[in-house]
């Protein structure tokens, strides 16, 4: 907590010092795009796939965007001690990018809570940010699921600098509710990890469940430091809960929580969002839950199977496997590719001003009907993508397997 | 015994300064004094029983009987048994050298890791037969206990003994330092993420249902190991020659030395015993929760130290009682209130207990306490 507080303080101070470069032009013809992702802990596999996707996009563009040469630097926003994203490290990454005169764009963060820290720092520095994975509503709008003061508190200059290529949680919440309803859930319950992302998504899902006619019996936080959650499971069992949605990230003791809920409510179906949908949750080899629970687990990610993508997407998957090996496909790889592609496209569209940070931000926000590996999409005035499809994943033999495309209808 | 007149409770100076108001004060103070007397006599009992009784009454009012609250208390006792074993290490060390051994929670974490590593080495998996599993777990537990005991002795020898006569802050800082070193060992060992381990005892399998209270394998494991260990330890400290040496050293190390007791060896023995208990707790934790993590010792250490203070620091039975009470508070809060509030409720309980009985439930047994 102290570290988080210090990080915010340092971030605030740092923002002030870097504020002098607001609206500045990155020097020279070589520009730098940074990425900041958790390269340690349970999210490591996803982050590595994102980095691979980013590199592939840059390689295919010949390391160029318009008349500029693009240099890519990968940063880690996690620490070995926390095993997940860390406020201090995230702040440090954003400050490093802000202090680098060649920085033109910043791809990150993976976690919404981390972006809540990096956005204000980059906003003061006038640097555009593209998240390949954030879904928390409050980062871009004050719609349901946002906390008081969001999103204004992330943009101290009053100008927007943050966009994302994944659909926000109003859509994920609606997708989860749609799946729960179609699975016949009658008494759903939501548990959230109390972080920016988990709490916001829990509100979105709760709203969507109400709209779908199956209001949740409750929406409680879970203590990520607890030794176990047997009494929580017993409480839910006592209420007759038949479906549980774990709204948060798996790093917050999600494996223990899943085991205890599964054991305490033997017939309950367990649903989780993209924050859980990774091998660290379900693979026993990586310390995940035992395979005996596989049939009861499902998760949603804004990624579809290769066959559901447009030709450009299908081609991406072939090229990715050709470069990084067959069987190495991870749902997030395509988002890394899409984020870097959007970055290169925005720099290119800014023309000779491609080294002007504000012009590149303007180009990001003026993205309209851009053909991409994800399909054709636009970025709205809040920085949100127009793409809405979610993929539902099940678990087989300790691996996450694509199940079907979900067209959200409950929200 | 009749209560003394209220004005007698005030000092002469107070009476002199407020002579004119004495009759009025006496009248007004009477109910207050009565409440104060009542609280000082029964406050602690009220505090301890408030949660269970309130929820028991609520259950009865809703026609649910006693099963639910008994299930909470059963879960609390079985969870608390692990905290009790860790708390013993804190209380033993504080009792003898008046040091908060911050590294103790991490020694407990190492116990979990060694246990997990050992059953991997021994080839004990879900496919192993019952006898093989029991045998493997006994061997793994014994090795974890010896490893943690030796580690604790080593920590004392390296980080605390050279600072025996240094200001109290010095060993406190070396304790914090060792805590971080051990955490980093754990980090290197299994990485920064939670690590699920094989459920070798089918922890949540319901063994028997007694009037709606479900006794699961994990309950039997936790209580079945903790009770004999605690009884053995208490018997050792109370009756053995070495145990008497420990108590003598705790009371007055200089006098103990003059009586021919090897104080250094006695202190090492204390660390050994604390480490053995932490090793056993580490094994139980891994089997009970089936998830281990490099920083599990931090939270466990905090809870266990709280248990030791709650029960009366330096008091073995107090540490066990404190552990069990915290276990029960946690389970009741998780189930009946919200797990978000559990840490706050546990520490609110600690504060209330300290207010009503600053020396802890069963009384301190330290040199300071006499």
Image (spheres, coloured by chain):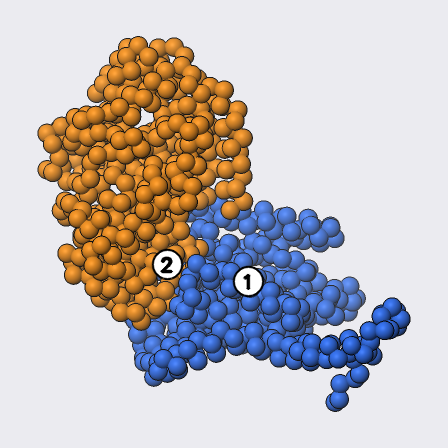
Q: Position of residue A149 (x, y in %)?
A: 42, 41
Q: Are marks 2 and 1 in contact (CB under 8 Å)?
A: no
Q: Does B140 sit left or right of B124 as displayed?
A: right
Q: Position of residue B170 (x, y in %)?
A: 68, 48
User: Residue beneath label 1, please?
Assistant: B347
Secondary element at image label 1:
helix
Tell me the chain of label 1: B
Q: Is residue A12 above or below residue B98?
A: above
Label 2 element class: strand
Could you tell me which residue is drawn at 82 percent across and 76 percent down? B22
Left-right relation of B162 to A290: right
Q: Colour of chain A?
A: orange
Q: Colour of chain B?
A: blue
Hey, which quadrant is residue B88 in on the image? bottom right
The picture places residue B109, in percent across and down from the top left corner, at 47, 56
Q: Quadrant of residue A357?
A: top left
Mark 2 is surrounded, within 10 Å at the Cα level, by few (under 14), some (14 to 19) or many (20 or more) other residues, namely many
In this view, the residue farthest toward the bottom is B1
Report whether mark 2 lies on the same chain as mark 1: no
Residue assigned mark 2:
A220
Residue A50 picture quarter: top left
């Amino acid at each position: 907590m102290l570290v988080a507080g210090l990080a915010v303080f340092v971030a605030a101070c740092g923002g002030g010092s870097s504020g002098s470069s607001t609206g500045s032009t990155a020097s020279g013809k070589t520009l730098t795009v940074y990425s900041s992702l958790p390269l340690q802990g349970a999210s490591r596999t996803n982050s590595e796939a994102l980095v691979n996707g980013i590199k592939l996009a840059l390689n295919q563009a010949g390391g160029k965007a318009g008349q500029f040469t693009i240099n890519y630097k990968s940063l880690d926003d996690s620490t070995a001690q926390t095993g997940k994203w860390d406020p201090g490290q995230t702040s440090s990454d954003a400050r490093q990018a802000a202090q680098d005169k060649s920085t033109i764009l910043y791809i990150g963060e993976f976690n919404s809570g981390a972006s809540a820290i990096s956005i204000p720092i980059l906003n003061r520095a006038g640097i555009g940010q593209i998240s390949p994975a954030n879904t928390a509503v409050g980062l871009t709008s004050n719609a349901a699921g946002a906390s008081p003061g969001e999103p204004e508190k992330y943009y101290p200059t009053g100008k927007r600098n943050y966009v994302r290529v994944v659909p926000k949680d109003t859509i994920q919440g609606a997708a989860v509710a749609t799946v729960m309803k179609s699975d016949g859930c009658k008494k759903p319950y939501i548990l959230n990890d109390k972080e920016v992302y988990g709490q916001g998504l829990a509100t979105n899902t709760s709203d969507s469940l109400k709209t779908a006619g199956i209001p949740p019996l409750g929406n409680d936080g879970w203590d990520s430091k607890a030794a176990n959650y047997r009494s929580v499971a017993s409480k839910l069992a006592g209420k007759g809960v038949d479906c549980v949605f774990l709204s948060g990230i798996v790093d917050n003791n999600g494996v223990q929580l899943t085991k205890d809920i599964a054991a305490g409510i033997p017939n309950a179906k367990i649903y989780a969002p993209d924050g859980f949908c990774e091998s660290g949750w379900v693979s026993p080899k990586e310390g995940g839950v035992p395979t005996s629970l596989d049939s009861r687990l499902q998760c949603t990610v804004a990624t579809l199977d290769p066959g559901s993508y447009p030709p450009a997407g299908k081609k991406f998957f072939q090229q990715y496997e050709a470069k990084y090996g067959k069987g190495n496909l991870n749902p997030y790889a395509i988002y890394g590719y899409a984020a870097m592609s959007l970055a290169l496209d925005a720099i290119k569209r800014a023309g000779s001003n491609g080294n002007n940070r504000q012009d590149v931000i303007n180009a990001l926000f003026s993205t309209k009907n851009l053909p991409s590996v994800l399909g054709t999409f636009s970025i709205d005035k809040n920085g949100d993508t127009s793409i809405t499809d979610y993929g539902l994943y099940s678990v087989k033999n300790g691996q996450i397997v694509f199940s079907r495309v979900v067209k959200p209808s409950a929200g | 015994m009749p209560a003394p007149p209220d004005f007698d409770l005030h000092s002469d100076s107070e009476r002199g300064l407020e002579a004119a108001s004495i009759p009025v004060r006496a009248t007004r103070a009477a109910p207050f004094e009565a409440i104060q007397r009542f609280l000082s006599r029964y406050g602690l009992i009220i505090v301890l029983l408030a949660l269970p009784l309130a929820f028991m009454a609520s259950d009865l009012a809703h026609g649910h009987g006693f099963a639910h609250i008994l299930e909470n208390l059963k879960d609390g006792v079985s969870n608390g048994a692990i905290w009790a074993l860790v708390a013993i290490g804190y209380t033993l060390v504080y009792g003898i050298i008046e040091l908060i051994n911050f590294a103790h929670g991490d020694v407990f974490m190492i116990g979990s890791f060694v246990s997990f590593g050992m059953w991997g080495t021994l080839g004990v998996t879900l496919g192993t037969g019952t006898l093989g599993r029991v045998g493997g777990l006994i061997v793994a537990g014994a090795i974890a206990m010896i490893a943690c005991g030796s580690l604790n002795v080593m920590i004392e020898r390296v980080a605390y003994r050279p600072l025996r006569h240094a200001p109290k802050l010095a060993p406190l800082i070396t304790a914090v330092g060792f805590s971080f070193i051990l955490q980093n060992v754990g980090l290197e060992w299994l990485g920064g993420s939670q690590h699920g381990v094989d459920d070798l005892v089918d922890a949540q399998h319901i063994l028997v249902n007694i009037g709606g209270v479900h006794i699961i394998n994990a309950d039997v494991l936790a209580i079945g190991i903790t009770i004999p260990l605690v009884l053995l330890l208490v018997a050792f400290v109370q009756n053995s020659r070495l145990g008497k040496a420990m108590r003598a050293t705790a009371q007055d190390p200089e006098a103990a030395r003059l009586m021919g007791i090897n104080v250094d060896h006695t202190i090492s023995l204390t660390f050994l015993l604390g480490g053995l208990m932490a090793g056993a707790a580490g094994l139980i934790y891994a089997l009970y929760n089936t998830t281990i993590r490099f920083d599990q010792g931090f939270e466990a250490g905090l809870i266990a130290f709280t248990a030791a203070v709650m029960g009366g620091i330096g008091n073995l039975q107090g540490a066990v009682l404190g552990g069990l009470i915290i276990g029960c508070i946690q389970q009741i809060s998780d189930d009946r209130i919200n797990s978000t509030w559990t840490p706050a409720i546990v520490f609110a309980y600690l504060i209330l207990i300290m207010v009503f009985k600053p020396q802890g439930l069963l009384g301190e047994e330290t040199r300071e306490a006499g």
